[in-house]
Image (tube, helix red, strand yellow):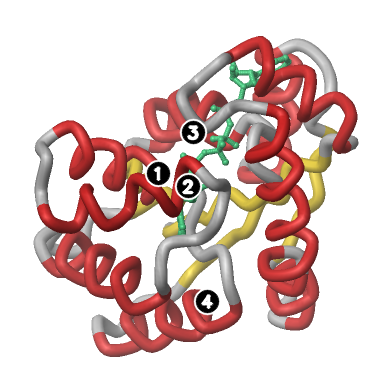
Amino acid sequence: MHVIILGAPGSGKGTQSEKIKDKYDLFHLSTGDMLRAEIAANSELGLAAKSIMDAGNLVSDEIILGMVANKVNSLNGKHMLFDGFPRTLAQAEGLDKLLAELNTRIASVIQLDVPFDAITARMLARGREDDNAESIRNRLEVFSKQTAPLIEYYQQQGKLSVIDGLGDVDEIFARVTKTLG
Ligand code: B4P
């Protein structure tokens, strides 16, 4: 089963993904982690991505889809957990196409639902380089405009489960496992 974890920035996708991948033996594919690794390695891609990420904007669909396709093609059919990807309709359509070429598809999409005020508090407490008030405000706006339409996209495919993302990390994980089975 391939699973997508969807939610606003700071909704806890990365936190829940660590637990989900262990329980279901999935490869954790986080585009945020991949981009941060490129920045740490001072690669050309990392240099291009850093200022975009610091401002809270999205890296281009072309770059992201290329990066994901390379990784997916190297995994020899291992089941995947997509975290922070897709973030736009173009990315979602690109992923469907990529998986169809491999004769496979997404089984479930988990949406972590957390109110924006709780998200802002979490991210300010985390204090990552891109977690300042202005970038957070922009990331939430980008989410509402570019990523929220994916909720309907996956709803129409009959794959979406909305999970309350407020509460204790283990409590939220129990809600996720109840849904994934
Ligand atoms: P991401 O790395 O995807 O990061 P995120 O959305 O900020 O975080 P996440 O939802 O994983 O939250 P976390 O568990 O860490 O993206 C960073 C940037 O990369 C983007 O802004 C964009 O520029 C770029 N990017 C990535 N993917 C892209 C794509 N596909 N296309 C284009 N650009 C892309 O949790 C947040 C905090 O909350 C943590 O401190 C955590 O400890 C805390 N927390 C978690 N669960 C909690 C709970 N239950 N209660 C209280 N606190 C909790």
Q: Of the residues tagged 1 and 4, which is closer to the observer?
A: 1
| Residue at the disc numbered 4 | 92
Q: Position of residue 143 (x, y in %)?
A: 71, 57
| Residue at the disc numbered 3 | 17
Crowd rating for badge 2 (residues with CA inside 10 Å; few <14, some 14–19, many 20+)? many
Identified by mark 1, the residue type is Gly
Mark 1 / mark 4, whichever is N-terminal = 1
**Left or right position of 93 against 120:** left
Mark 1 / mark 2, whichever is N-terminal = 1
Q: CA distance from mark 3 to mark 4?
A: 19 Å
Q: Is mark 3 within 8 Å of ligand 1?
A: yes
**Residue 129 sits above or below residue 68 on the image:** above
Residues at discs 2 and 3 in contact (Cβ within 8 Å): yes
Identified by mark 4, the residue type is Ala
- Mark 4 lies on a secondary structure that is helix
Crowd rating for badge 1 (residues with CA inside 10 Å; few <14, some 14–19, many 20+)? some
Q: CA distance from mark 1 to mark 4?
A: 16 Å
Q: Is mark 1 within 8 Å of ligand 1?
A: yes
| Residue at the disc numbered 2 | 83
- Mark 3 lies on a secondary structure that is helix
Q: Quadrant of residue 176?
A: top right
Q: CA distance from mark 2 to mark 4?
A: 13 Å
**Residue 132 sits above or below residue 106 on the image:** above
| Residue at the disc numbered 1 | 32
**Residue 181 sits above or below residue 89 on the image:** above
